[in-house]
Image (cartoon, rainbow, N blue to C red):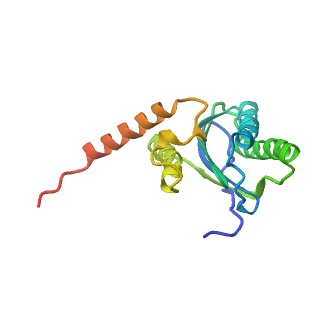
Amino acid sequence: MFTGKPEHLKTFDYLGRYQYFLTFCTHCRTRLFVNDDAIDTVRTQIERAAGEQSFALLAYCYMPDHVHLLVEGRADDSDCLSFISRAKQFSGFHYQARFHQRLWQRYVYEHTLRSEEAAVSVARYILENPVRAGLVECVEDYPFSGSSEYTVKQMLDAVQLQAEWYRRRSPTRSG
């Protein structure tokens, strides 16, 4: 398990219409995202930061001790580093005020995506996270995942279309 400080790319300015896969972990990996009130408090503030920084939340999933986000800059001046900072600041402040507990670890794990295929793969990973963790049997049963842009069904349909496209492109093997 990686325990060091994640580094941002030094040659990339994080400005513009890019997509990012982000993971915010709770302080000491405490299981804080286990009820509607906590998640609603945090989600509202992350959505606030997204709106202020011109980002769309393409997919999200609140696991008990972390949140995965697939975000996309919607303007040439969309600043991912500012979005991250504001999202953590707003949500941490409101969470602390309501629940009297620190919310976030200091660092964020981020990855800049380079293609639409990568975005669909990340969305699939995010949506399937609760299934892999044994929290639910199917994606649709998990109440703490979604998107500000799409329904879960629309996201699952896109994932299915991508899987079918890759299957058709793969050469068949003969025995």
Question: Quarter of the image containing the N terminus?
Answer: bottom right
Looking at the picture, tell me which residue is in the foreground, 128 or 19: 128
Q: Is residue 162 left or right of residue 47?
A: left
Q: Nearer the viewer, residue 133 or 59?
A: 133
Residue pictured at 61% horizontal, 40% vertical? 71
Residue at left offset 50%, top offset 55%: 134
Which one is in front, 132 or 148?
132
Q: Is residue 100 visible?
A: yes
Picture coordinates of residue 61, whole percent (x, y): 59, 45
**171 to 158, vertically: above or below:** below
Q: Position of residue 58 (x, y in %)?
A: 57, 36
12 versus 72 height, above or below: below
- Depicted 113 relative to depicted 41: above or below: below
Question: As drawn, is 8 to the left or to the right of 172?
Answer: right
Instruction: Look at the image and tell me whether residue 23 can be seen.
Output: no
Q: Quadrant of residue 28?
A: bottom right
User: Residue 155 placed where, x, y %?
Assistant: 47, 35
The quarter of the picture where the C terminus appears is bottom left
All told, the count of numbered labels is: 0
Q: Residue furthest left?
A: 175
Q: Where residue 151 sits: x, y (%)? A: 52, 30
Pick the residue in front: 83 or 158: 158
Which quadrant holds residue 36? top right
The image quarter containing residue 16 is top right
In the picture, measured across the screen, residue 109 lies left or right of residue 146, that is: right
